[in-house]
Amino acid sequence: MGGLVVHARRGDRAHYRPIRSSLCDSARVEDVVPALLGLHRFARLYIADMDALLGRAPQWSAIDAVRRIAPALSLWIDAGIRNRRDLTAIAERGTPVLGSESLTAQAAEQLLAACPHAVLSVDYRGERLLGEPALLERLPRWPSEVIAMDLARVGSGQGPDLKHIATLRRLAPRSRLYAAGGVRNALDLLRCREAGAAGVLVASALHDGRIKPSDLAATLKGHG
């Protein structure tokens, strides 16, 4: 938000505040990203542009700053994409993330056809799907990478909801699935992997030190 990295909590976006991290003393994106890369050689960074998701002007300058800081880093960018124009603007900077909460089932189908390498985020708030249930039924072809996002668990410390991973494994058996929301520690990383997740989206547990570099290395080694 406004060029600052915020601490996401339970999807209550209007009340997100700048992050307080053990990795660095600043919430500026130019400081947080190098701090994360100092913790581990991540290959991919998920960026949620909260301003765009709240209907404000996208934070292109902040996204472009990340691109300059880490040009080799793959960026997944969630900026409330709703149409082809939004899709094009994001695709120029990284991999678009299409969120079910922002799209009709028809729009999602059209945008995935236009950009097959886009990531689909199937968004939940607890047990409730955010978006049209038809989205899960009508896709003729699921994208290769799908996020199971539980906004009610983001920043909650409750642990991930693995039922969503199981649901999406049945619907999209050929897709790589990513758990998002509630990951607390190394045990949760293991549980997600055992549930069939190819990876996780995690932030809070990195910033407060609950997940350490050794945990990340051990998980990745165990994943082959």
Image: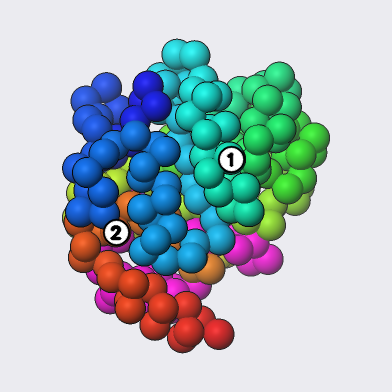
The image position of residue 115, as x and y in percent, is: 76, 39
- Tell me, yes or no, if residue 167 can be seen here: no
Q: Residue at x 73, y 23 (%)?
A: 84
Q: Residue at x 45, y 24 (%)?
A: 53
The image position of residue 184, as x and y in percent, is: 24, 62
Of residue 153 and residue 13, the one placed in the foreground of this image is: 13
In magenta segment, residue 154: no
Of residue 129 and residue 54, the one placed in the foreground of this image is: 54
- Tell me, yes or no, if residue 31 can be seen here: yes
In magenta segment, residue 181: yes
Q: Residue at x 53, y 68 (%)?
A: 198
Of residue 215 and residue 176, the one placed in the foreground of this image is: 215
Q: Which residue is mark 1?
A: 67
The image position of residue 165, as x and y in percent, is: 46, 62
The label number, if any, that marks residue 114 in the structure image: none
Tag 2 secondary structure: helix
* Residue stretch rendered in magenta on the structure: 171-196
- 17, above or below 75, in the image: above
The image position of residue 85, as x and y in percent, is: 71, 19
Q: How is the image coloured?
A: rainbow
Q: Earlier in the sequence, mark 2 or mark 1?
A: 1
| Residue mark closest to the camera, 2 vs 1 | 1
- The image quarter containing residue 135 is top right
User: Is residue 35 found left or right of 158 in the rendered image?
Assistant: right
Q: Which residue is mark 2?
A: 206
Q: Residue at x 52, y 24 (%)?
A: 61
User: Is residue 29 found left or right of 115 in the rendered image?
Assistant: left
For label 1, the crowd category at 10 Å Cα-Cα, with few meaning under 14, some 14 to 19 and many 20 or more, is: some
